[in-house]
Image: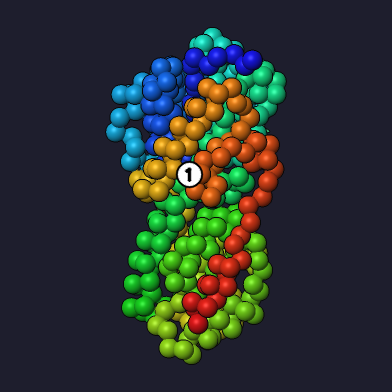
Amino acid sequence: MPKKIKKIGVLTSGGDSPGMNSAIRSVARTCAYHNIECVGVYRGYEGLIEGDFKPMDARSVKGILNKGGTILKSARSKEFRTKEGRLQAFNSLTNAGVDGLIVIGGDGSFSGALVLNQEYNFPVIGIPGTIDNDIYGTSHTLGFDTALNTVVDAIDKIRDTASSHNRLFFIEVMGRDVGHIALNAGIAGGAEEILIPEEDLGLDRLVESLNRSRKSGKSSSIVIVAEGDKIGKNVFELKDFVDENLEDYDVRVSVLGHMQRGGSPSCFDRVLASRMGVKAVESLLEGKSNYMVGLKNGEMKLTPLESAIKGKTKINLELLRVSDIMSI
Ligand code: ATP
């Protein structure tokens, strides 16, 4: 029989994402609902090592549901990658009487949680918080939907100026290894082309597509480029390429950068965070460990942390086809 959980710690780790605060609130309130204690851990694994904890009750998480970022702060910790660092973290947890940990973050943060469990048999549950949507075992990570809305809003605004001047814009969006943001926001923003890490569309096709757009009378063109697009050229190099190889194009570049991570979480992310927090706490109370909570076919499901870390998400190829048809 696993030990009965009486006090749960929660931390945010790695890159922040909108919805993390909503998840912290959900964890604290679910603990209060089940009459167990909850502590917030500041600065991810750094704060875990240092014992930087703060008790959280239902009221102490008021007013954060709609706030971007994370009130607990996030960090990357080199020390937690060492055995000594993790021993210190384990000691901090036991000294504070914490007997279960919820980690909100990406696959790196889950790897840390898994090692802590393997070394000290400490119960851990993960909540996927990253805008990239690159975690296996959930159709949506926390923050993905908000980031999409932010990017689409930016594309709409850039479109206004692009069409006023008959310009071509290369817009870089986040996604070093996956193109989920680029593909979805590209379709929603009416992009003429979308360049992603998963598929090499090739420069020839880009040229052909731009020429086709021009001939068909379009007054502006927008190409969405994921950071790690497979053509291997960044937005500035793409601009240079068009300047050198195509005549009469007035090309501009916009790198959206960190604004994609900020902002008030969308309705979808707030609901998702609330559900994930409940599922995470209740899973720990049921004696479960080493799982990530995720959304599958509309339901909250558990995936072993190991699969969540190792598994790869796939791009929806149908979306590429839809994008092609829409940009005719
Ligand atoms: P993002 O999606 O923003 O990259 P992430 O959770 O993947 O988020 P990482 O920087 O990879 O972010 O990991 C966060 C922290 O987790 C690291 O700074 C480190 O402290 C811990 N961590 C990652 N991998 C391991 C590991 N193999 N062993 C121990 N700790 C780890």
Question: Against 233, is 291 above or below?
Answer: above
Seen as rendered, the residue at the extreme top is 95
Mark 1 surroundings: few (<14), some (14-19) or many (≥20) residues within 10 A: many
Picture coordinates of residue 184, whole percent (x, y): 50, 62
Q: How many marks are shown on the rendered structure?
A: 1
The image quadrant where one finds ligand 1 is top right
In the image, residue 91 lies at what x, y percent?
59, 12
Specify whether tag 1 is near ligand 1 (CB below 8 Å).
Answer: no
Q: Position of residue 216 (x, y in %)?
A: 46, 89
Colour convention of the picture = rainbow
160 to the left or right of 304 = left
Task: Tell me what residue is drawn at x 40 percent, y 65 percent.
Answer: 155
What residue appears at the point 40 percent right and 83 percent down from the top-left corner? 219
Viewer-nearest residue: 241 or 46: 46
Residue in the image at 65% along x and 36% along y: 304
Q: Amino acid at mark 1?
A: Leu
254 up-or-down from 76: above or below: below
Can residue 44 be seen at all in this image of the molecule? Answer: no
**Residue at x-position 41% and y-position 26%:** 30
The residue at which mark 1 appears reads as 142
The N terminus sits in image quarter: top right
* Viewer-nearest residue: 69 or 142: 142
Locate residue 49, reporting x and y percent.
Answer: 56, 20
Q: Is residue 183 above or below residue 292?
A: below
Left or right, 74 with respect to 67, comes to: right
Q: Nearer the viewer, residue 58 or 259?
A: 58
Q: Does the rendering let one see residue 202? A: yes
Is label 1 in a helix, a strand or a loop? loop
Please determine whether, in this image, residue 187 is positioned above or below residue 99: below
